[in-house]
Image (cartoon, rainbow, N blue to C red):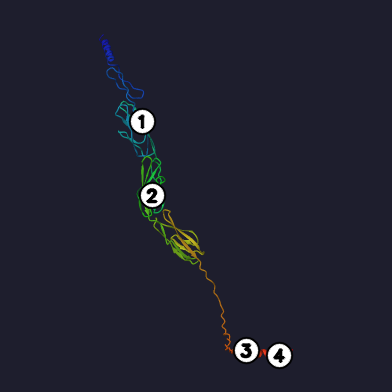
Amino acid sequence: MRVSIIVVLSALTLAACGGGGGGTDSTGTTGTTGNGGGSGTAPQTLNVSPSTAHLDPGQIQSFSATGGQPPYTFSVTAGAGTVDASGHYTASGGAGSATVRVMDTAGATAQATISVNAPFVTPSLAASLDSGTQHTFTAMGGQAPYTFSVRSGGGTIDSATGIYTTPATAGSATVQIVDALGSTQLITVTIAPQLSVLPGSITVTAASGQSFVFAGQGGTPPYTYALASGPGSVAADGTYTAGSSSGASTVTVTDQLGTSVSAQVRSLRIRVNGPVWATVIWAAPLPQPIPTRRRVWPFWMRRAVRRSSDAICNRAFSTVA
């Protein structure tokens, strides 16, 4: 009899207090118990922000949670990388994917998906170039597009293509490459003096066996010498030997980096004529006429002589008749 009275009293007491404890809602978040006879009120749904992320290796993404019942616990449930108690996720060193989960005190969970790019790298972190030349810098991995700039030193670079033009003088520079996610690569550039060849031009005699030594200067040794065109030949040490025919030749000098300059050679042929023979005959000078003195007769005498001559002629003609 006493036991039945106790059970009835307990049931009445529970009814007066508003019923039993709270249950679990459909989202997996546990409800809370109501006060003063009211029914239980479900908490807000647990969320994580951002729900997706795209990172380069080694980059950090901060995740935050809202709703549910704080405090929250973060963990990596799939893939690589690490996350701390504040939700700061650090991507792994290689390409892949990962999942970060946040859990509240009621056991409700939410998750974020992370995609990790291939490592952002360049072929080399150092470059040696000749002054007055061009070089194209490239990168791979990370998140395209890439942005190129000259962080320090001389020269100019196209921000989109990475074509770098070295200055005209020797020195150094630093080229910076940044991907779309902000990852950065720095390349140290050493710039050698401008390549040249001495002398710039020579003139030789064809078929004479003459030789001359060309010498590369500046650039990045060692140098390679070659005959690009024309008669003659060039030895490995830069010695040019004249050919058997005349004409113009071009000698090129190439340094270790592939930069080339050229020198000009003019080969001339000297024409030698055969001996010239001549016969000289000496003769005595021809006799010259002896000049005579002309006698000038007076006018009256010349007239008298002319009249006498006319009279004689007339007499002769009369006789013949």
Earlier in the chain: of badge 4 and badge 3, it is 3
Looking at the rendered structure, the kind of residue marked 2 is Thr
**Does residue 217 appear left or right of residue 282 in this picture?**
left
- Badge 2 crowding class, 10 Å Cα cut-off, few under 14, some 14 to 19, many 20 or more, is some
Earlier in the chain: of badge 2 and badge 4, it is 2
Q: Residue 316 has which mark?
A: 4
Distance Cα–Cα, label 1 vs label 3: 160 Å
In the picture of the structure, the residue carrying the numbered disc 2 is 156
Earlier in the chain: of badge 2 and badge 1, it is 1
Looking at the rendered structure, the kind of residue marked 4 is Ala
- Nearest-to-viewer mark from 1 and 3: 3
- Nearest-to-viewer mark from 4 and 3: 3
Q: Position of residue 239 (x, y in %)?
A: 44, 62
Asked which quadrant contains residue 66, the reply is top left
Quadrant placement of the N terminus = top left
In the picture of the structure, the residue carrying the numbered disc 1 is 111
